[in-house]
Amino acid sequence: MNVKSILAKPIAKRIQNRVYKWAAKPKKTQEKVFKKLIAQAKNTAFGKDHNFENINSYQDFKANVPIRDYEDLKPYVEQILQGKSDVLWRGKPLYFAKTSGTTSGAKYIPLTKESMPFHIKAARNALLMYIADTGNADFVNGKMIFLQGSPIIDEKKSIKTGRLSGIVAHFVPNYLQKNRMPSWETNCIDDWETKVDAIVEETIQEDMTLISGIPSWVQMYFEKLTAKSGKSISEIFPNFNLFVYGGVNYEPYRNKFEKMIGKKVDSIELFPASEGFFAYQDKQNEKGMLLLLNGGIFYEFIKTDDFFDENPERITVSDVELGVNYVMIISTNAGLWAYNIGDTVQFTSLKPYRIIVSGRIKHFISAFGEHVIAKEVEHALKAATEGTGISVNEFTVAPQTNPDSGLPYHEWFIEFEKEPADMTDFISKIDREMQEQNSYYYDLIVGNILQTLKVTKIKKDGFQDYMKSIGKLGGQNKIPRLSNDRKIADKLTAKRVQS
């Protein structure tokens, strides 16, 4: 056994004890974070504008700080870009993480000297919690790959700017540098397809033990490895035993991955974003990810069903319920205040607090009042493919409100690796699962408002071609599972399999 793996186990146990210590006191932990955030930001421009000096309780905070999205925050960000200090947080940010916005163009999310360490610490602790939970530390002896954006930083602006995954690459601990792949030069390649080809060349002869990235882009990497070698992933990397992912639900990909790999491997789910690192999977046999309550982030929650009301109720972790769909609102030591990140979550455990990401508040289908969310379509597809041999590469769902004939319906765009032998039965299974999960959908089907869903088969690499056409191939980009309009659907229709 390697020295690294020997040393990792006692360190992992120590970290596990610390983590569960604060997790056992959630209310006290969050109160401490809340008070510290308010105290540290009371003399900022935002703090003065929102009466931080007189905020002594959560009720005071709600009365003074409204929920906001990036458009509401933008005037403060503009002040920072103009060179001002003490705007959202003390001093100036270390970086801006540049992300793609939908209505506001590029978004610039601040990363401060207080917030940046939590991104690194959370990623490290996720691996250590896995070691403590399973006793498996063998992966630390081999090579580890992180499929991520370019680490090139734009230093022309007043604040250094880059993609979060690229910024994080500058903070990889020294003890991991020798194990980490790809090389710096390869990581800097901007074109995603060229980059993946270069990663294949660099890694195909290496002892890869840990692979990390968004499942759809790791799938591309695996496909290129297999095409080049003619072997399964476990034959190429016999010691590969841990897959780390975030950004999307792994379940729709799991069957395909296990076939490509040639064996089952453990996985760790993460919930990182430019706005903060919110959760990670702490147990292999428990559903959900541990909500990080001591990471410089104060959490609020609003029931998704109430979110668009004029004055929706805002609550803390103390008042959440299991299985309810919530919009997650954050205030952070990077200077985001009552900020809607757009993600919706459900709690799977309250002791400790664990969550799953159920979707995006903007990614849903309710063209007919059905309130369908990502978790429901993912579950329905998993149920319809489980134990069947059917394999799906990618999918998304949109409403068809004006069909050429018949009732409206939900249209599922699916790129199959292996198609169903009986498409009618496959569609029936998905539709039945959707009706069982979503009572609104059930009522619309039974009431003859909607007809049974339809499947449009997308040709091989059709989703990748679509992402490339909009300049979002690779990195942290992913296909929305749901849209309430036909913008994506209309583009994908041109990539359908001709019958």
Image (cartoon, rainbow, N blue to C red):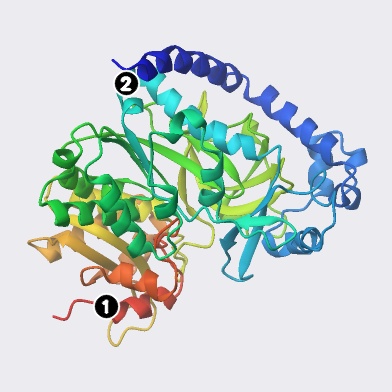
Task: Give 1 or 28, whichever is nearer the viewer.
Answer: 1
The residues bearing labels 2 and 1 have C-alpha atoms spaced at a distance of: 44 Å
Left or right relative to 35: residue 177? left
Residue at point 21%, 72% (across, down): 459
For badge 2, the amino acid type reads Asn
Q: Is residue 4 above or below residue 277?
A: above
Left or right relative to 198: residue 237? left
Q: Looking at the figure, which quarter contains the C terminus?
A: bottom left
Q: Is residue 435 visible?
A: no
Task: Give 115 or 346, whichever is nearer the viewer.
Answer: 115
Q: Looking at the figure, which quarter contains the N terminus?
A: top left
Looking at the rendered structure, which numbered label has been put on residue 136?
Answer: 2
Label 2 neighbour load within 10 Å: few <14, some 14-19, many 20+: some
Task: Give 80 or 269, whichever is nearer the viewer.
Answer: 80
For badge 1, the amino acid type reads Lys
Q: Is residue 291 above or below residue 495?
A: above
Query: Between disc 2 and disc 1, whose residue precedes?
Result: 2
Disc 1 target residue:
495
